[in-house]
Amino acid sequence: MLKFWDHIPFSKKMNSIVIPDYINSIHPYEGGKPIKEVARELNIPEHDIVKLASNENPLGISPKAKKAIENNIEEVSRYPDGNAFYLKEAINKKFNISSNQIILGNGSNDILELVARTFLTVNDEAIYSEHAFAVYSLVVQAVGAKGIEVPANNYAHDLEQFLLAINKHTKVIYIANPNNPTGTLIDKSTLKSFLDNVPKNIIVVLDEAYDEYLDDDIKSEAFGWISNYKNLLISRSFSKAYGLAGMRLGYGVSSSHLIEVMNRIRQPFNVNNLAQIAAIASLDDDDFILNSKKINNLGMKQITTAFSGLGIDFIKSYGNFIAFKFEDEQAAMMYYQHLLKNGIIVRSIANYKMPEFLRVSIGLELENDKFIKILSNCNI
Amino acid sequence: MLKFWDHIPFSKKMNSIVIPDYINSIHPYEGGKPIKEVARELNIPEHDIVKLASNENPLGISPKAKKAIENNIEEVSRYPDGNAFYLKEAINKKFNISSNQIILGNGSNDILELVARTFLTVNDEAIYSEHAFAVYSLVVQAVGAKGIEVPANNYAHDLEQFLLAINKHTKVIYIANPNNPTGTLIDKSTLKSFLDNVPKNIIVVLDEAYDEYLDDDIKSEAFGWISNYKNLLISRSFSKAYGLAGMRLGYGVSSSHLIEVMNRIRQPFNVNNLAQIAAIASLDDDDFILNSKKINNLGMKQITTAFSGLGIDFIKSYGNFIAFKFEDEQAAMMYYQHLLKNGIIVRSIANYKMPEFLRVSIGLELENDKFIKILSNCNI
């Protein structure tokens, strides 16, 4: 082979790989610590560790989903159905949404990212709230677009400020409802009024990962809105109440046009086949969701009652987690470490500009008990 | 809530969502037809269908992997370990690659896409071969970069032409070795000489999804090259010989610097936990890989012998599939339909600018037999 190198005059001056600035300045997402990692680092047996750090379902998975996985392990040597025919059919059956209005994601993270990658360019802006789910800013930054963070109102989304932040560069708006990590909820009429006021060329992403935990009267009705708001996309998750965090499955619901465009850049096999099979079975297990919600309500009461007894401030939460407050960042970190050393994993939310808070996921009664006991025994 | 709409003068003129041109002009990837889909459409029982369309392992999955999945189903309610500590350890043990030189993907598709999303901007170019794996051009187009397709030399990558295609905008080069769908292989010395001639600011992605099917003397040694070529990234897959296509798992190996930068935009939980568990077990099952390779060698001989007997032209293949040729596109499509109607799914590769070819994956002996029988019975 000829040495072409010598004939490429610019090559010698370009010896190092150029990384775009917007990529270089990203701070990656940090999830809750896995149980095995804590066991390894602190030399504690795994079964002594209680993980209340990632808003997982403490009941585990639906027995129907477990059975479905067991019965279909042989399937994994085949590529998944990239169109997820049967899963879309199951979602349609449950929520009355046509297949062409559904896009499947490798977790709802994948949906949030696909919106950014499909619609945002380096000249565009996306709006989200202060203290909102960290993935919004990450996916916006990863495509080189500008993220506009709107100040929160007492930790909640301030949608009037969102409207004021809109300009001719605005292309996407992310709203978490309920929001993680604050647990705050926007009521339906405010949300609808907001949608009426957003220009139709702007995509509104409504992230409803925690909707299953809401009481019937405050549950989202947004699936019924998509025929009126073609710029609305709702994302849902199987990682929370459905107990399938490890399988990675979420979905987006929107106008068929937006779904079709997003599907163009979706990885053809982004959702593994056991996730599809488990999700179909889970959608058919209403009892499991009802029970998960019941356990969550009881646990939420158990923990907030204890917080009040201990004089610990917290933000009223509509999710399966709760953010609670200490005097300052230092106190929060000391409590975090104290809990961790005693085998309880909670979450620091300093990266959400809430350094004096910690976030705890609602567990089973005994897990919550252990959390409360160790929290109250802390001699700091 | 106030009606802000009226105070936003531009909004009324912008009623429709603007899609970037490069997204609008994408033609999404089409995978092989799933067995269930063919059964549904043609009203044939699933067990009568032979799928030889997606280069899957006809042996299924490793028994060790199956057992590992069975024993860990309860895990799926927990988020996966985003750092894949144990899987990286297993890869390290097998191939002697440090954890910080490994990135995990939701299939190797995810790795190929992460390269494009991390390093390419709309001002950059990426080079790949004519007839090369379709995902390269798709991921390049999805970020708005320019894809440069280098003409193939008798269906194989022409690396001298690659070098001539390099200019100051070139940032990434994708090479498939062996290539899908042509099955062609580049020998090691040519590849190494190529790497010596590529400017160090250009990332060379070496896609080795089919490496496990190569005989020992021609197997890749590229893992041993990464210390010398900091701009080299090798991608590997668990979807082929490892039999885990449905689980979605691939990985990239490169210099720690490139891996670190790519990890910044990797979805934190992109690899599900059963995939991680299954892959660890599979890496520990050398017998399964040896047997898969043996079955593939026998099947390749069985099918090429039949082709020769039938006077059908084909491209010598180093993978677990083979591209075979008809007089023209019309003949190829007629054979495709004839096979399909008789329950054999193969793949049209018209979208690879090879309309007169079909591609068949190597199956088990009986599956290959059925394919050959139906192929030779075609009265077209």
Image (spheres, coloured by chain):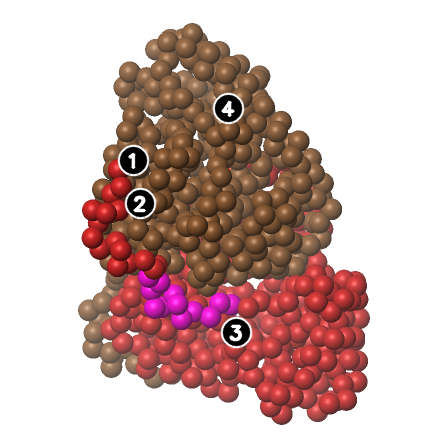
Chain colours: A red, B brown
Q: Secondary structure at mark 3?
A: loop
User: For mark 3, what is the residue?
Assistant: A179
Q: Choose mark 1 or mark 4, whichever is in front.
A: 1
Tag 2's secondary structure? Answer: helix
The range drawn in magenta is A18-29
- Residue of label 2: B197
Q: Is the C-beta separation of discs 3 and 4 under 8 Å?
A: no
Q: Position of residue A88 (x, y in %)?
A: 50, 47
Cα distance between the residues tagged 4 and 2: 36 Å
The disc labelled 4 sits on which kind of residue? Ile
Question: Given the image, what chain letter belongs to the residue carrying mark 2?
Answer: B
- The quarter of the picture where the C terminus of chain B appears is top left
The answer to whether marks 3 and 1 sit on the same chain is yes
- Say which residue label 1 marks: A1
The one nearer the camera, B302 or B331, is B302
Residue A369 location (% of width, % of height): 79, 76
Give the camera-side residue of B305 and A112.
Answer: B305
Q: Earlier in the sequence, mark 3 or mark 1?
A: 1
The spot of residue B207 in percent (x, y) is 43, 41
Mark 1 and mark 2 residues within 8 Å of each other at the beta carbon: yes
Badge 1 amino acid: Met
What residue is drawn where x is 26% and y is 71%?
A: A169
- Where is residue B258, by image quadrant? bottom left
Q: Residue at x 50, y 45 (%)?
A: B224
In the picture provided, is B202 more to the left or to the right than A81?
left
Kindly identify the amino acid type of the residue bearing the numbered disc 3: Asn
Q: Nearer the viewer, mark 3 or mark 1?
A: 1
